[in-house]
Every structure is written in structure tokens, then in C-alpha cells.
Amino acid sequence: EAREQIRGGSRLQAVASNVAGGRAQLRNGHEALAQGQSLIQQANTALQSDADPLGPPPEAPKSWTNIEAMARRAAGKEVTLRTGLADLERDARGAGVSLLGVSASEAAASPTVDSYAKQQDDKLLSFLSKY
């Protein structure tokens, strides 16, 4: 939406707000991804440490493959979103939109909570904590 506003030259003040919202959402997503990756690492460490050193190597449950693939896709998407946001910020500055005033108020703003996403994250974290 912000990119269309920049290209169209309309509602340029809303662009700064949209960019700030995008930054906040990206930061929240990064924190959730980091927490998920930490849980994956903890689960792998627990699997390896619980294994019999003289026995065969432990085999991770098949569902872990899906979780690790999801984490890789999420990390790739984060890189794509960061690049897109950087391009959007550059375009906004080129259009004369000041993003400085928004960054200060952005830090004070409370993040939007997506209840469905939080519910899905909680399910995934609960599943990972079992291992």
C-alpha cells in the first residue's frame, strides 16, 4: 500500500505511518523466528544428549523435517521483506517523505497482535517443547 502511495504521490504522510508499521511487524516476526530457531536448537540438543553414546545415532521424528523447512522458509521470507522495506524506505525518502519523526513515535507505539498467528505460534511452540 505504501509503495502505491509513493508512486501515486497521494497521502504521503500515511506512507511514513505504513513504513513504521511494517518495521514493527518485521521486528515482531524476527523475534518470533529467533525464538522458534532457538527452540529447534534446544530440541536437537536434547535429542542428541539423551541418546545412548554406544548405540545408533538418534533419529529425529519426521515432523521435525517439516518444522525445520518452515523455519528456513520463514528466514528466507524475512530477508525478502527486509529488502523490500529498505527499497520502500529509499523510495519514500526520494519522494520527500520524512521517516525520522515516525521512528521515534514507532518505538512508543504498542505492536499489533494477530490473535490467529499467536495461536498458531503457541501451538508450534507447545509441540516443539515436547521434545
Image (cartoon, rainbow, N blue to C red):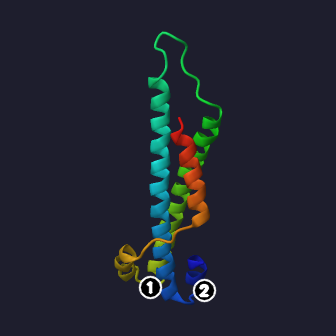
Q: Callout 1, which amino acid?
A: Gly
Q: Which mark is residue 96?
A: 1
Q: Callout 2, which amino acid?
A: Gly
Q: Dot 2: what SS? A: helix
Residue 129, compared with residue 101, is above or below; it is: above
Residue 99: x and y in percent read 40, 79
Q: Which mark is residue 8?
A: 2
Label 2: how many residues lie within 10 Å, few (<14), some (14-19) or many (20+)?
few
Q: CA distance from mark 1 to mark 2?
A: 13 Å
Q: Residue at left 55%, top 58%?
A: 80
Residue 47, compared with residue 3, is above or below; it is: above
Upstream in sequence: badge 1 or badge 2: 2
In this view, the residue farthest toward the bottom is 10
Quick one: 78 or 106, which is closer to the camera? 106
Q: Residue at left 56%, top 60%?
A: 118
Residue 102, compared with residue 80, is above or below; it is: below
